[in-house]
Amino acid sequence: MAKCTTSIALLNLRRRNSSIKSGSSYLQAMEPFRISWARIPFFRYTMALIAGVLVGVYLPLGEGWGWPLFAFGLLWLIVLQFISSPVLRWKWEKFTAIPVVCAIFGLGLILVDHHTLADRPDHFSKEAQGRFLKAEVIEVPQEKAKTFKFILKVEASDGTEEWEPMKGRLLAYIQKSEGAGRVEIGDVVVFPNVYQEVNPPANPGEFDYKRFLSFKDINQQTYIPEGQWIKVERRWRLRAMAERARSYLRERVGSVGMSKDEEAIASALLLGKKDELGPELSRSYASAGAMHVLAVSGLHVGIIYFILQGLFKLAGLWRKGRLGPSVIVISGLWVYAFVTGLSPSVVRAATMFSAVTLAHGMGRHSDIYNTIASSAFLLLLFNPFYIMEVGFQLSYLAVIGIIFLHPKIYGLLYFPSKLWNKVWEITCVSLAAQLATFPLGLLYFHQFPTYFLLSNLLVIPAAFVILYVGVAYFALGWLPGIGFVLGKALSYSILMLNQSVLWVETLPGSLLSGIDIGILETWLMYLMILASTVYVFYQRRSALVLATAILALLMVLQVQEVYTLKRFDHLVVYDVRGQSAINLVGQETNLLFCDSLLAHSPDRQQFHLRNNWNRLNAPEPDFIVRGRADGLHYLGDALFGYKGRTFCRLDRSGLMDELAEDSISVDYLILSYYQGMRPERIFKTIKPSKVILDSSIKGRTLYKRTSLSRCPYACSG
C-alpha cells in the first residue's frame, strides 16, 4: 500500500520551512475554505472520466450511450466557436463546462466498451471452433507450486484451412517443466482449445477472484499439461527487455552474500520482485504497517527523483523554466521504471512525477492538483480499468492526502531542532497519507497497523538509505573494492530494516485485524474525515455537525450489523478444494473442523475463511483436527449436539462401526471423503433431515457414480 508516498508534498519543503518559522503557516491554513475550479480544470475532467468509466463498469451502457453523449458535447463546443454576437457568446460560455463534462463522460463509456472484448462477436469463447488456440504471453509469468501462471492474449484459432483471427484474454496454468520456466512476455504459444469459465466465490465473504479478473477482461481459464503446448514465436516487447534487465540486477543482488530474507527484501524494495517474500516475512511487514516499502511505488520513485534533483542542484542547474534538466530527470525516472519491470505501480508514480517535473521545466505555474489529475487522466485513457485496481486508488488518494493535509498538519507545531523537525515532517507525511487511505485499507484488507507512525519513522529513512546504496551498488558494484563496501552496506542496511520491523511487530496490539466494513461505511468515513478537516483547519461549525452526525450513523450501522449477525448461530461448510472445513460460529465460539493441512495454512484461511469470520465478528478459531471440541455435547465420536441441533459427522472409516444398528435420526449429516465410504450403508443407518457434502467429496468418482449425486435429502456444501 503506497500510503507514505513522499512525492509531491516535499517539493516545496524549503518554502514551507520559511513560512513556518515566521509563524504564518497555521494562519494560512485557517483561511476560508474555497475551491478555485478554474485553476484545476483537469481535476473536473478526470472526475467526469471516472464517472463515465464507473457507470460503464456497473451499468454497461456501451457505445449506445457513449457516442451520442460524446458527439453532443463536442457539437456544443463547436457551435460556441461560431457564435458571433458577444452578448450571446458571453451568456453561453458560462455553460462551457456542461458540454465538456458530457463529452468526457461519454468518452469514459466508450473506453470501457472498447476495452471489454468479452462481448464482441469475434471473442474466442464465441467463435473459436478449431482444436487449437494461438496466444501471446502479455504479463510476467508467476511461478506456483506445480504450475506457471500466464495471462494470454488470444490471437487466432485454427480453422479448416488457416488460422482465423480471434480476440480475448485467457488465464492459463501450464504444468511446471523446464520449457515452461523459459517462457516470457512476447512468446506466442499454441495449445488445445479447452477452457472453462472462472468460478465465482464458493464461500461467504470469499475474495471474488472472478470479478477481479473481469476487470482485466479475463473470464475464462485453462490448465495445460506438459507436452500439450508449443512455443512457435518470440516477439520483441519492451516489457520483456525490462524483465530481463530486472533479472540481471536480481542476480547482482544475489552476489552480495546476504541471507535469504535479506535478499527477498532487497529484491522487493529495489526491484519490485515480491514473489520471494515468505508468508511470515510479509505478515511481519503488514503488521508493522511497513508493507508499502516493499511495493515499488511513489515512495521509491520519489527517492530516485530527489537523487536526480539533488545532483542538478549541486551543479546549480535546477531552475524553473530550464527544460533540459527536467527532461534528464524524467528520463532517469523512466529508466528506473524500466529496470523495475514497468509494473503498474511504478508506471503510475513515474507518470505523476513526470507531469510535475515537466511543468517545472516549462516554467508553468500549474496547480499541483491539476498536474496530478492530468496524470490520472492520461492513465485512464490508456486503460480505464485502472480505476478498479486497489493500487491505483490508494496511490492517488495517498498523494492527494499528502498534498492537502501535510502542510496543514505540519504547520501546527514548530521544532527549532533540525532533527526533530525532520521527525515531525515524516510523522506529518505518514499521518496525512494514513488519513487519506485507511478507510479504503479497512475495506480491502480488514486490518489496521496501530504503530504506523512509529514504523514509518524507522522504515522511511531506512528506505532512503537502502535505495541510495542500492543505486550506487548497481552503478559501481563492478569495481572490486567499492562493490564490496557497497554490498556490505546494503546488507547491513536491510538487516537493520528487518530488525526494526520485527521489533515493531512484537509490540502489544501492533495490528487490529478482523475489521469488516462495506462500501457505504467507507464513503461515510471519507465524508467524516473531510468534514472534520474542514472544521479543524477552517473553523466551519456546520462541518463539525456533519462529522458528528456521520460518526453517530456509523455507530448505529455497526451496532445493527453486530446485532443482526451475532444473535444467530452459524453452520458453514466451506468449499476448499479437496479439503474438509466445517465451521460452527456462535456468539463466543468459533469451532473449525478441518484437516491438519488447512489448520496450518494461514494463506488458505485468509483466502477462503477469514473474510467470513470478519463479517460475523467471530473470535479466533479453535481448530479441531482430531478429537473432541469443548462446548459440544458428544454422544460418540461421530454424534454431537450443538444449540439444540443434532449432528453426525463422518470423516474417517471406523465411525460407522461405533453407531447403533438401529436407525438414528439427526438434523444434519456432514460427510467428508474417506476410503471405504459406502453411501448405502450410511443412509440405511442414519436418517438425516439434511445432508451436507463437504468439498473433499466434490468431483470424486464416488460422488458421480453413487447415490450421493442423487441424494434424496436437501444437499448443500
Image (tube, helix red, strand yellow):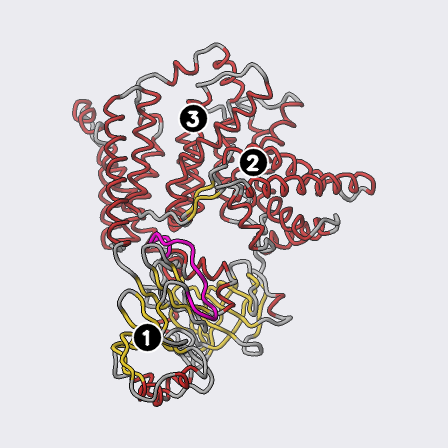
Direction from residue 254 to residue 516 in the image, left or right: left
Whether the residues at callouts 1 and 2 have beta carbons within 8 Å, the answer is: no
Q: Position of residue 95 (x, y in %)?
A: 21, 31
User: Dot 2 corresponds to which residue?
Assistant: 330
**Considering the numbered disc 2 on the image, is that residue within a helix, a strand or a loop?**
helix
Category of crowding for the residue at label 1, using alpha-carbon neighbours closer than 10 angstroms: few (below 14), some (14–19), many (at least 20): some
Q: Which residue is mark 3?
A: 366
Residue 1 position (above or below residue 537) = below
Magenta: main secondary structure equals loop
Q: Amino acid at mark 1?
A: Ile
Is residue 626 in the magenta section? Answer: yes
> Mark 2 is on which residue type?
Ile
Residue 257 drawn at (x, y percent): 75, 49
Query: Which of the marked residues, 1 or 2, is nearer the chain's N terminus?
Result: 2
Task: Give how far across and how far down residue 601 sits, in percent.
Answer: 51, 62
Q: Which residue lies at the image location 30% right of the left edge and 77% below the top edge?
A: 691
Q: Nearer the viewer, mark 1 or mark 2?
A: 1
Q: Which residues are magenta?
A: 613-629
Q: Who is closer to the viewer here, 110 or 519? A: 519
Answer with mark 3 or mark 1, whichever residue precedes in sequence.
3
- Kindly identify the amino acid type of the residue bearing the numbered disc 3: Ser
